[in-house]
């Protein structure tokens, strides 16, 4: 028992710390890489302006949705309407109504049994 209780924490802590260290080192190297590439692009654009990439504005084409999209929108509308109905129902009132209806049915059955 003493061997395993000393071995497992002895392995877990160093492995955890080395994993965290390697993760931090990797993230900092990636960040440095991105910063260096941005700085190189900026410096090259000062001396050679043609290197800077020109970003065009995205072009959007507005058209009619396909039948598939129309059916999905219709389906989503139906599901949303059903969800709103279920959300807005007074469930305590429904419960009282069900309890009252069951009570009346039971009273009716008892009255029929007494009448026989």
Image: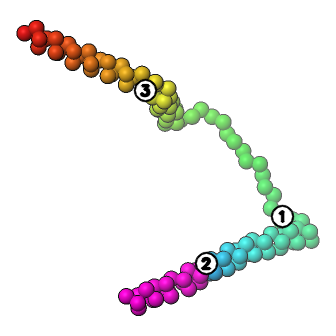
Nearest the eye: 26 or 61: 26
Q: Nearer the viewer, mark 2 or mark 1?
A: 2
Sequence-first tag of 3 and 1:
1
The residue located at (71%, 78%) in the rendering is 29
Query: Which segment is the magenta one?
Result: 1-19
State the image coordinates of residue 16 (x, y, percent, origin top left): 55, 80
Secondary structure of the residue carrying tag 3 is helix
Please tell me whether residue 89 is drawn above or below residue 111 in the rendered image.
below
Crowd around label 3: few <14 · some 14–19 · many ≥20 (10 Å): few
The residue located at (83%, 73%) in the rendering is 40
Q: Is residue 16 magenta?
A: yes
State the image coordinates of residue 82 (x, y, percent, origin top left): 45, 28
Q: Which residue is mark 1?
A: 52
Q: Which residue is mark 2?
A: 20
Numbered label tally: 3
Sequence-first tag of 2 and 1:
2
Q: Nearer the viewer, mark 3 or mark 2?
A: 3
Q: Which residue is mark 3?
A: 91
The residue located at (43%, 86%) in the rendering is 5
Q: Is residue 110 magenta?
A: no
Secondary structure of the residue carrying tag 1 is loop
Of helix, strand and loop, which mostly describes the magenta segment?
helix
The residue located at (52%, 33%) in the rendering is 73
Nearest the eye: 34 or 41: 34
Crowd around label 1: few <14 · some 14–19 · many ≥20 (10 Å): few
92 relative to 42 in the view: left or right:
left
In the image, which disc is placed on residue 66? none
């Amino acid at each position: 028992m003493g061997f395993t209780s000393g071995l497992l924490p002895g392995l877990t802590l160093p492995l955890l710390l080395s994993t965290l260290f390697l993760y931090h080192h990797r993230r900092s190297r990636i960040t440095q890489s991105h910063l260096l590439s941005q700085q190189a692009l900026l410096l090259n654009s000062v001396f050679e302006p043609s290197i800077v990439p020109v970003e065009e504005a995205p072009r959007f084409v507005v058209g009619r949705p396909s039948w598939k999209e129309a059916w999905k929108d219709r389906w989503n509308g139906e599901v949303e309407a059903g969800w709103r109905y279920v959300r807005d129902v007074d469930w305590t009132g429904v419960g009282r109504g069900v309890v009252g209806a069951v009570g009346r049915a039971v009273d009716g059955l008892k009255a029929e049994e007494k009448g026989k």
